[in-house]
Amino acid sequence: MQRRQLLQLVAGSAGLLALPKLGWTRQTWAGNPFSMGIASGSPTSDSLVLWTRLSPDLIEAAGLTHQSTPVVWQLAHDEKFSRLAAKGIVQAEPALAHSVHAEVSGLAPDRHYFYRFIAGDAVSPTGRTRTFPLSTATPARLRLAYASCQQWGNGYYSAYRHMLEENLDVVMFLGDYMYEYPSSRPADVRPTTGGWITTLEGYRSRYALHKSDLNLQAVHAAFPWLVTWDDHEVQNDYAGTQEGESGKPMANFMARRFAAYQAYYEHMPV
């Protein structure tokens, strides 16, 4: 362990002593429950959303599949969390795949913050986010990046490594966060597991696959995101209540769309 990591661990452990016991003493994990990363998004001048989802494998191993799990969130002015701006506890509910959405308000405009989550004996990595300026402000600069169409099999998410080198204010994601179909060509650099997805569990698994990419996780943790969807979050070329033409036709397309929309919410900082 490097000296800097050790100091961060000591500082984090000291900070845990001030937390409600509900959030950190009841559950011992067999691994990292934050393996899908953390994220912030939907920023305004005084609010934002903090997101994570507990690992389904560790939830199952702990016998918590059908139980809610308390998760502590902290938002701080400094990376050591010595000056907290806000904190709270969110119940990670099985009905929402043990995802966490902390909607934080009352924040200062145009300000950087640091955040993290705590579940049982596990502490997430530290994320960095920021609020937008007031609507009446005239900022001199806005630094943003946009991304879309991150099909898992077509390539590694190396462009996100470049984004990390930029001092961005926000990342805009313009849709097709994942794709509903399996690997489409022999040249895919990594296999898309799970085949065609049409159910809630299928969509959840596909998001979990994409969220396992470390470059994607790093950019989510580094900057707030504004997100919207396109068609592949449900099905290629679907529109409103009209089913698309790819894959096997379904008897109840609206049930598929409902499942896809729910999974989207479960995995986005909205």
Image (tube, rainbow, N blue to C red):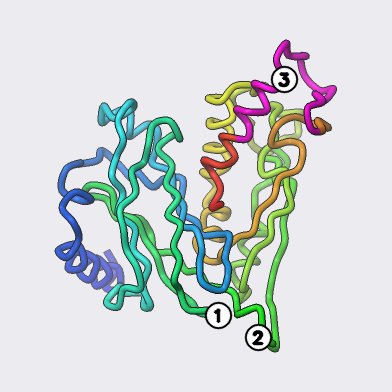
Residue 93's place in the image compared with 50, above or below, is above
Reading the image, the residue beneath label 1 is 110
Q: Residue 253, which numbered label? A: 3
Crowdedness of circle 2 by 10 Å Cα count: few (<14), some, many (20+)?
Answer: few
Work out whether 29 lies above or below 164: above
Residue sitting at x 25%, y 38%? 30
In the picture, measured across the screen, residue 230 lies left or right of residue 85, that is right
Image coords of residue 63 (percent x, y): 26, 27
Element carrying mark 2? loop
In the rendering, which numbered label is found on residue 137? 2
Examine the structure image and report whether residue 200 is included in the region drawn in magenta. Answer: no
Residue 185 in sight: no
Q: Is residue 5 visible?
A: yes
Amino acid type, mark 2:
Ala
Please tell me which residue lies in front, 245 or 87: 87
Residues shaded magenta = 240-261
Q: Are marks 1 and 2 in contact (CB under 8 Å)?
A: yes
Mark 3 or mark 1: whose residue is earlier in sequence: 1
